[in-house]
Image (cartoon, coloured by chain):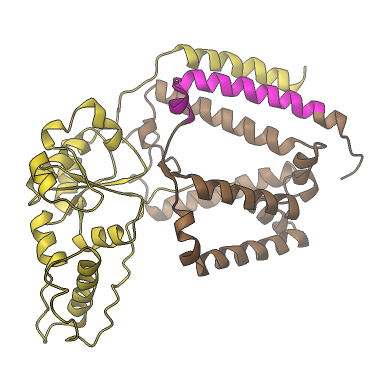
Chain colours: A yellow, B brown
Amino acid sequence: MKPRIWLALFVIPLGLIIAAVPQNTSHPYKLTASQLLEEVNTRTQFITPETVADMIVKKDPTLQLIDVRSQGEFEKFSLPGAINIPIADLLSEEHSGIFDQDAKMNVFYSNSTLMANEAWMLTRQLGYENNYVLEGGLNYWFEVILNPQEPASTSPDEEFAKYDFRKGASQALGGGTVSAQTPETNSAAPKPAIKATPKKKKAAGGC
Amino acid sequence: MGPLSVNELISENTNLFLAFVIGTAFGFVLESSGFSSSRKLAGVFYGYDMVVLKVFFTGAITAMLGLLFFSLFGWVDLDLVYVNPTYLTSAIVGGIIMGLGFIMGGYCPGTSFCGASIGKIDAMVFIIGLFLGVSLFGAGYDWWEKMYLAKFLGSPKISESLGLSDGVFALLLILVALGMFWAAEWAEKKFPREEY
C-alpha cells in the first residue's frame, strides 16, 4: 500500500473521533492561591503610567485599556481608547472574549488601584493571562502624566529624564497646565524618551 | 502547571540547551529528507516535487491532532498555547515577499541554514540576503511601522470564524490535506523531471 493510504487509514479515524467528541473547555491549570500570592508579592500585575502613556502615544494596537469604574465616571473622563467594563459586569458572558485571549494586553484602571486590582485578581483566578493594572490608578496618572512636577535641581539625571518623558507624554495626551508654561527651563531635549514596551516571553515558531 | 508544561520547572538555560538539542535534531532530519536542496524545494512551485507540501501538511495535521487529543485528555490547556497574533496587512505583504524569496532563492529561512551547513554556496548567499533584509527592515521601521501594525485581528481561529467546533474543522482539514496529497502525486506524475 502507498504511504498516503496508510496515513489516511490512520488520521481519518482520529479526525472522526475528534470531530465527534465534545470540546474540552475546562481550564485545568488555574492559578493556585499560593501562586496568586506570589504574583501579588512581586507586583507583576502593575504597569507604570509611563509605559501606558508611551503605548497610547505610539498607538500600540496590543494595548487594551479597560475602565472598571461606573459608566457615569467613565463618561466624565477616560483614557484614550479605553473601554468601560464596570466591575459588576466583569463576569458577564459578553466580555469573556476580551479577557480570555492571547493577543492584547489588557490594562485595568480605576481611580486608585483598588477596583482595578480586584478585576485583575478575578481574571487571574479564571486563568486568563495578559491582564495588568495601571500603577497608582487615575490619581497617579494625573499626578505624573498630566501634571508632572519638575524635580529638584539636585535630583539625579534619571529624574530629569523621567520628567522630560512625562512632559512629552503630557503634551501628546492633552495635559492641562503644561502648555501654559513655557517649557524652556530645562536644557535636556524635550523629546520623550523611548521606552521598551513589555513583550510577551513566549517563543514564536517559524519555518 | 500541567504535566506538559515545563515553564518555570526548568531554568531558562536548560530550556535553551534543550532547544539547541531539538534544533540540531530538526536540522538533521531536514537535511536527510533532502530539504537542503533548493531544486527540491522549488519543485513545489513547478509541480515536479511536492515533498515540501506533503511534509508541512503532515506536520500540521499531526500537531493539530496531538494538541486536540491532549486537550481532550486534559493534558494541555489550549488557552495557554501561544498563537501568533494576526496583523492582516503585514501577513499578506510578508507572505508575498516570503514567496518571492522562496521561489527566487530556492530556500526558506530554516532550510537555507540547512543547506549552508553542508556547504552549499547558494544557501550561504541566501543567508547573507536574509540578514540584509532583516537589517533593512529594522533600519526603515519608521517608514513601514503603520503598515506593519495595520489590521490587527488578535489571534483568531479559522474554526471560530467559520462557526465550527475545533474537532469538525480538524476533520475537514485532514480531508483537504489528503486530497492535496493526492493532487500533489498526480502533479508529480504530470510534470516529471529526470534529474534535479
In this rendering, position of residue B8 left or right of residue B71: left
Looking at the picture, how far across and down is residue B137, in whole percent? 54, 64
Looking at the picture, how far across and down is residue A126, in whole percent? 22, 32
Q: Give the quadrant of residue B74.
A: top left
Residue A70 seen in the current view:
no
In the displayed orientation, state which residue is furthest to the front: A180
| B178 drawn magenta | yes
Looking at the picture, how far across and down is residue A72, in whole percent? 8, 42
Magenta-drawn stretch, dominant element (helix, strand or loop): helix
| B25 drawn magenta | no
- Above or below: residue B82 compared with residue B189: below
Is A64 or B4 nearer to us in this picture? A64
Is A29 or B24 nearer to us in this picture? A29
Magenta span covers which residues? B158-186
Is B32 or A178 nearer to us in this picture? A178
- Residue at 36 percent across and 51 percent down: it is A61
In this rendering, position of residue A17 left or right of residue B123: left
Residue A75 seen in the current view:
yes
- Residue at 28 percent across and 62 percent down: it is A54
- Above or below: residue B117 compared with residue A21: below
In this rendering, position of residue A127 left or right of residue A70: right
Looking at the picture, how far across and down is residue B93, in whole percent? 58, 50
